[in-house]
Amino acid sequence: MRGILTVIGKDKVGIIAGVSQKLAELNINIVDVTQTIMQEYFTMMMVLELNPQLDFEHTRKELSDIGEALGVKISIQNEEIFEAMHKL
């Protein structure tokens, strides 16, 4: 199962490191990543490989908590739901 993770917030040191560390702790593999700074705002999108037995709500809470600690908003969705929402 794959997931789509987005991170948005004011840019500061340690965002990528903090998010990546939390994903490693949760045993989640980063398949693809893109990030940019738009003026003073940090944006990042990741495609993740998730274990099918993963407790998705627990993972969402863990990522939300690290986002709060880093001062950014982190969202995660199942890739299938993400694709269905963005089809034309």
Image: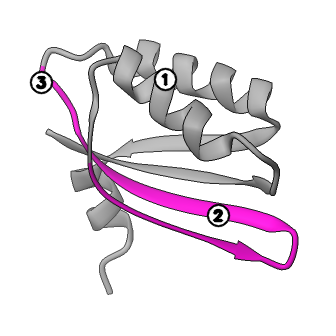
User: Badge 3: few (under 14), some or many (20 or more) residues near its Cα, within 10 Å?
Assistant: few
Classify residue 30 by image quadrant.
top left
Question: In the rendered structure, which segment of residues is drawn in magenta?
Answer: 31-52
| 76 left or right of 71 in image | left
Which residue has dot 1 on it? 22
Residue 8 position in % (x across, y down): 69, 55
Q: Is residue 44 magenta?
A: yes
Residue 38 percent coordinates (x, y): 76, 78
On the image, numbered disc 2 is attached to which residue?
A: 43
Give the quadrant of the C terminus: bottom left
Q: Quadrant of residue 39?
A: bottom right
**Does 26 sit above or below residue 6?**
above
At x 71%, y 72%, the residue is: 37
Which comes sooner in the sequence, label 2 or label 1? 1
Query: Circle 1 sits in a helix, a strand or a loop, which is it?
Result: helix
Which amino acid type is shown beneath numbered disc 1?
Answer: Lys
N-terminal of the two: label 1 or label 3? 1
- Residue placed most toward the observer, 1 or 12: 12
* Number of residues whose C-alpha sits closer than 10 Å to that of mark 2, classed few (under 14), some (14–19) or many (20 or more): some
In magenta stretch: residue 42: yes
Q: Secondary structure at mark 3?
A: loop
Precedes in sequence: disc 3 or disc 2:
2
Q: Which residue is mark 3?
A: 52
Residue at (28% x, 64% y) in the render: 84
Mark nearer the viewer, 3 or 2: 2
**Toward the viewer: 8 or 57?**
8
Horizontal arrangement in the rendering, residue 76 relative to residue 74 (left or right): left
